[in-house]
Image (cartoon, helix red, strand yellow):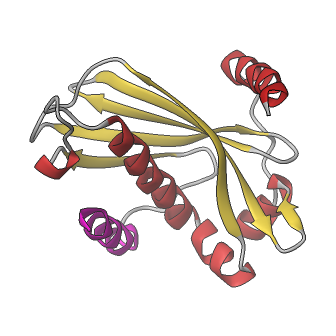
Amino acid sequence: MNLYFRLLWLSLMARFRPRLGALDESVLRMRVWPFDLDLNRHMNNGRFLTLMDLGRIDLMLRSGLGRVVVRERWMPVIASSMVRWRRSLLPFQRFELRSRMLCWDDKWFYVEQRFVRDGRTVAIGLVKGVIRCRGGHVPPAEVFAQVLGQAPEAPPVPAAIEDWRAFEGHLSGLD
């Protein structure tokens, strides 16, 4: 239930925050609440993933993608995620969730999301997602054309994303 309050607050506040460009960073300031904790009394690893959803929603709302998704009846879908935890977040600590579009290809969007406390990275996540429609997927170039009026040039794909793609290729043999 508490996540609905965070989502409602995020949705309301997005209207008053500056618009974001395709490669701009969203910064959400949050606090660890008691219902975010696990038995070790630090933020639960699953809660990190859930809060990452809020960071991506903020990116969509403030970039204008949210309106287009609703109008076109598209569905943003996550296909894969990877998180590296480095430090704990303890009860009532403040932190920032920094989300940004890292790169894209003909099908996939790649988003980097960092949890930062006192200037130090607590956790970093990479998310691979796609925009779905009735006929399959919507290519990123079309998504950008609908939202921005034109598709920006895709940034170079970082080596970490290339390595991740290769690793996923090995996982597909496990099906």
Which quadrant: the C terminus?
top right
- Residue 21 or residue 10, whichever sits in front: 10
- Residue 97 or residue 166, whichever sits in front: 166
Residue depicted at 33% across the width and 49% down the height: 28
In this view, which residue lies farthest toward the bottom?
A: 71
Residue depicted at 45% across the width and 27% down the height: 124
Instruction: Estimate the x, y position of residue 143 in percent, counting from the top left.
Output: 77, 62
User: Main SS of the magenta segment?
Assistant: helix
Up-down: is 142 above or below 104? below
Q: Residue 2 vs residue 123: left or right?
A: left
Residue 159 visible to the viewer: yes
**In the rendered structure, does residue 14 fall within the stretch colored magenta?**
yes
Residue 149 visible to the viewer: no
Instruction: Estimate the x, y position of residue 67 in percent, counting from the top left.
Output: 60, 77
Badge count: 0
Q: Which residues are magenta?
A: 1-16
Quadrant of the rendered image containing residue 101: top right
Up-down: is 139 above or below 123? below
Q: Residue 26 vs residue 175: left or right?
A: left
Q: Residue 74 vs residue 45: left or right?
A: right
Quadrant of the rendered image containing residue 97: top left
**In the rendered structure, does residue 35 fall within the stretch colored magenta?**
no
Which quadrant: the N terminus?
bottom left
In this view, which residue lies farthest toward the front?
A: 175
Instruction: Estimate the x, y position of residue 75 in percent, counting from the top left.
Output: 68, 68
Residue depicted at 72% across the width and 72% down the height: 74
Instruction: Estimate the x, y position of residue 174 in percent, counting from the top left.
Output: 78, 27
